[in-house]
Image: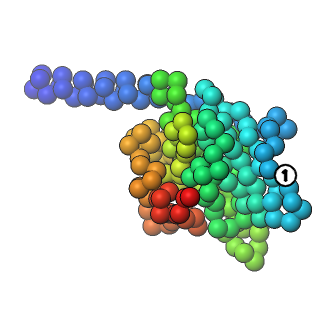
Amino acid sequence: MKFTAALIALGTLTAQAHAADIKSVYTTIDLKKCKQTLQPDGHVIEGGWACKGVAGYDIYLNAVDSREMVAFGTTDNANNCAGLKTFGGFNSAGKTIEWRLKDGKPIAAILRWTVSIDPEDSTKQATWLVVSKITQQDSCQMHYVAGSFPKANEAARKAADEKAEAFDCELSKPTFEPADKPPNINLESCSAQGRE
């Protein structure tokens, strides 16, 4: 009995130690402080920006046709997987990014999107938390949590902490919560969505 209790206590301590290795750091997107990388064309393209993130990892935001795309990394790579995805409905990314850092290095970023859910009425909106895996050269959207999902922020952090490092951007398909309500977004892996 004492041996079993000791094993349970050891497992709890190990889980707590692992969780303690990962922490949150928050940054805010302020386009006035970002470098403009894409000029508006007066028609569809609204602009592109590179913004400072954390630990040498930056944020790359493009706005096209009332939709936004956000990627993360150390270089502005036009083929960055996360930067090639956006929701089907008109949308905008939030301004606050929650970075999940392990040993001081970002492994994932969590960002809330506001998405139009009715093409006839743009005031009907929903929110989604998007969890993106981060590597030095790339990022990819790996998990989505509906803003209405119970304890959505905690669910997003859990997905980031437990899945990001093992998630294969090229081959793995993103997951979502709740499981019966997929977001209106391309749920293919990066290679399947046709990167160049």
The image's colour scheme reads rainbow
Placement of 78 over or under 21, stated as above or below: below
In this view, the residue in front, 18 or 124, is 18
* 84 displayed left or right of 181: right
Q: Label 1, secondary structure: give it.
A: loop
In this view, the residue in front, 24 or 172, is 172
Q: Position of residue 86 (x, y in %)?
A: 64, 60
Q: Position of residue 151 (x, y in %)?
A: 52, 47
Q: Residue lying farthest front?
A: 196
Question: What residue appears at the point 56 percent right and 58 percent down from the top-left corner?
Answer: 196
**Which amino acid, mark 1?**
Gln
Q: Position of residue 54 (x, y in %)?
A: 63, 29
Question: What residue appears at the point 55 percent right and 59 percent down from the top-left corner?
Answer: 195
Quarter location, residue 126: bottom right
Question: What residue appears at the point 54 percent right and 32 percent down from the top-left corner?
Answer: 106
Residue under label 1: 39
Q: Residue lying farthest right?
A: 42
In this view, the residue in front, 88 or 24, is 88
The quarter of the picture where the N terminus appears is: top left
Whether residue 67 is visible here, answered yes or no, is: yes
Question: What residue appears at the point 62 percent right and 57 percent down from the top-left corner?
Answer: 84
Placement of 123 over or under 196, stated as above or below: below
Whether residue 82 is visible here, answered yes or no, is: no
